[in-house]
Amino acid sequence: MGYFAVAVGTATRNKDGKIIESWYPQPILNPTDNLIAALNGVAKLNGGNQTTVIEHSLMSDLSDCFNKAGHRDSAQFCRATESSHQTIVLTVLESDAAPTSIGEGYLKLQLLSHRLVKPHGCSLDGLFGLLHNIAWTSEGPIDLPELADRQMEARLNGRVLDVNCVDKFPKMTNYVVPKGIRIGDASRVRLGAHIGEGTTVMHEGFVNFNAGTEAVSMVEGRITAGVMVGDGSDVGGGSSIMGTLSGGGKVVVSLGKNCLLGANSGIGIPLGDRCTVEAGLYVTAGTKVAMLDNGKQLVKTVKARDLAGQSDLLFWRNAETGRVECLSNKTAVELNTELHSNN
Amino acid sequence: MGYFAVAVGTATRNKDGKIIESWYPQPILNPTDNLIAALNGVAKLNGGNQTTVIEHSLMSDLSDCFNKAGHRDSAQFCRATESSHQTIVLTVLESDAAPTSIGEGYLKLQLLSHRLVKPHGCSLDGLFGLLHNIAWTSEGPIDLPELADRQMEARLNGRVLDVNCVDKFPKMTNYVVPKGIRIGDASRVRLGAHIGEGTTVMHEGFVNFNAGTEAVSMVEGRITAGVMVGDGSDVGGGSSIMGTLSGGGKVVVSLGKNCLLGANSGIGIPLGDRCTVEAGLYVTAGTKVAMLDNGKQLVKTVKARDLAGQSDLLFWRNAETGRVECLSNKTAVELNTELHSNN
Amino acid sequence: MGYFAVAVGTATRNKDGKIIESWYPQPILNPTDNLIAALNGVAKLNGGNQTTVIEHSLMSDLSDCFNKAGHRDSAQFCRATESSHQTIVLTVLESDAAPTSIGEGYLKLQLLSHRLVKPHGCSLDGLFGLLHNIAWTSEGPIDLPELADRQMEARLNGRVLDVNCVDKFPKMTNYVVPKGIRIGDASRVRLGAHIGEGTTVMHEGFVNFNAGTEAVSMVEGRITAGVMVGDGSDVGGGSSIMGTLSGGGKVVVSLGKNCLLGANSGIGIPLGDRCTVEAGLYVTAGTKVAMLDNGKQLVKTVKARDLAGQSDLLFWRNAETGRVECLSNKTAVELNTELHSNN
């Protein structure tokens, strides 16, 4: 009881027959016990987390399982597979344990991109080591050891095999395009990104896996792995958010609601709500920041890390003195329209 | 008399039969009255701005209309459609009124990218609301509500539907590649961009619609919607130009001739000719700028917005004091070779 | 005698029959005299550097030549061409003279990307003028004068010709993916890049031709033409390295080993080993830099160009004074974790 997730989909195998990626059109979070029991009856699973290749002859019965549980989309998919020659897989996650197979890892990345779990909302421990480095091409995913032969075959037949990406993570949009988003250059949003409804990722935007936006955001900068951006916050053109892997140390960097990172700015500390960083200014955890009062007089100088998570901060570099300064009050937000750009 | 534009092309319809995009191989600006009269005779138009689906049986007659008016390319296209099963559309713009249909909007975007009109040279009012958010894929444009089924169909047939972009604006190069340009990564130039002859848009460059370059430019930074860059000006790697939608307020930001934005720099004010911004410096409208004389002595401090549109400005941040400084004279340009990069 | 290189591959010709690009699956550096003699015997070459179209009827004999010289891959390729209708070319470079044909130029770019020569390791003089500006499309490379007709043909047949790039240089991965690399967005690595084993080029990274990395690097910024990055060095997100063509003058900019360019930083001087540039700081050749001792007291102020090539430098901008400062000692590297990001 209390399974974490289940999904049926297709998979790509390499020449050795090993599954190297899998696609799930309608992953299901927290399936009912009845659905799990029914699937077990058909597919003879033995509990635990697993990805099982399903014979096409069983797909009609699987379809019935999903149908009875009210998952008509999955039921319809199962029926549609009957005329297909592709590998069909059923992935069942009894718990949110660290993924131990590629099918499990891909399901978790798709749970994120389907917005069924939020960044940091499921265990991805060890995922990187599991995944194959794949050539994502105009003829589908190709395991790297097989690429050179496929390139030769294509060339000799008058085609160029277009290799768009060589990576462990594919682009999200080839797996799911959740509702209410736009993405200017889809090659810059990895599977496992959580793109909130109402978000536009412009061509200069980038969103890594296990990262993303809550809801309405304009993303024209880079959202590093692990970073979450709150509703109403804008990530300006070419701006940079440090993640957990680099200078930010162990604190997870995030942005609250209604923040604004100016163009070509950057932050290495998490920010609360209604914060603004001036275009072109990079605030790292170690940056010494002059805190000003409303009369713009110096109150004290602190390291930026001491401001982590605070709201209503307005950061800029004084153009006359070069000093990094910060106003901290709730009227700051109205004052800042000159300081930013989202180009 | 005095029609604004006319073009014949193909269109993509969604499952409801609605046109979601259209392509015009040879749009015609300011067609002659004789051509319009002839087209009206064949296609039974009733004046005004409109996009009309044309029966293939009429294409031979349409071809004659274009031929008599000297538009041999359009005539040839009309003849070529006779063996096609695609939807053929004729879009006539009696005036440059705000577009009211997708066919009209797409024609205007193509007038821009064909360099037949310049940015701000035609009305795009309300365009954004008209356009569909489309999945631009390896199998053509797909209306978003139809995407999931198409992804499933592709997967079950052993293909991955490659979704390159989810946006209201497609990339320009799939519609037209005007003469004398190079574009390193075409996904970063939107249809509606005006790329002047002699311009190279490197991989880090970006050009939005209703924006672009006059002539010879090296673009390695981001040209926001509405921004025009003059002949001989370079937009350095990762540099940022604020547009009209963000911090720049209502003033349209532009660059004159022979300007240079250094790598990772940015501007929030329009600049005249022969201006330079040092690599890494962001000058917003509110930046306080120390104006220096030729002896590098302070003359006065002004807000950058007061310098809007001036020529022969050289901006940098003093590395010893952190102050943003500006030299204003015609020899400034020769002095600045150390200050920039176009990588 | 010591020939420079030889390779057999396929080529694309335009409508005039001219070769506009060529692909070599296994280029051979410094072929043995015996191999050259054997190839001459079959293909009747006359010495010098040349690209020759080979009749399919000779491919079996060519295969034997390669086989006897121990190049089994090339031999296998030759045999595989026998059932192909593509243009097959043999390119022989007797010396590393400036390329005089497209086939020679493409071979040299592929020698670089196959890591058979390092950046600046072969003559590319005049290459730019030789190469055609090509539309790189979903239907292969198309010479620009032929593009409009191909777009029309595709549209009338219900396809969109996807034009990914309009440039003299294609993307590397469509020619070769060397061992041990990942590339997030392959459109940003040009053929002729040298991507060292162990390098990851993230989506924001860019590598030009005749440039690249020695070995293990994380590249999230822009490596300009001519620039080489040493083992263990990271090029942070959005960072910029000036090349030889821009503000850097005639000195070739490079990075030594174990350097770190912070996010959105930039350099216009070459650096030695273990150097760090703070996130957001751009150091051009003309930047005045305050050199500090271990007690952070000013020793002297120098222009950055005077520090060119030095090791163990740590650059940052003092957040209290706006001054660009530099610590130069071997413990600097341990101190700098707060100053950077590789997001």
Image (cartoon, coloured by chain):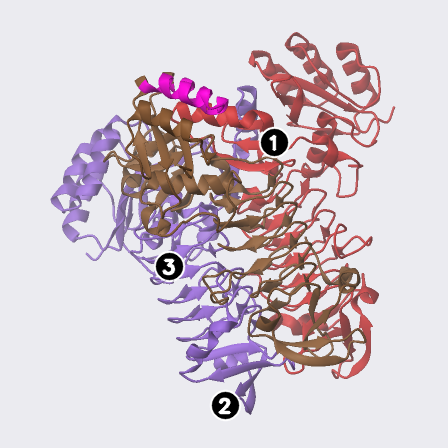
Chain colours: A red, B purple, C brown
Q: Chain of mark 1?
A: A
The residue that label 2 is drawn on is B293
Secondary structure beneath dot 2 equals loop
Q: Residue at x 73, y 52 (%)?
A: A243
The residue that label 1 is drawn on is A134
For the residue pair C205 and B312, the one nearer the viewer reads as: C205
The residue that label 3 is drawn on is B123
- Provide the residue span drawn in magenta: C58-81
Q: Earlier in the sequence, mark 2 or mark 3?
A: 3
Q: Is label 1 or label 3 in front? A: 1
Q: Residue furthest right?
A: A1
Discs 2 and 1 lie in a common subunit: no
Q: Check disc 2 and give the amino acid type.
A: Asp
Q: CA distance from mark 2 to mark 3?
A: 43 Å
B159 sits left or right of C141 in the view: right
> Do the CB atoms of the residues marked 1 and 3 lie less than 8 Å apart?
no
Q: CA distance from mark 2 to mark 1?
A: 58 Å
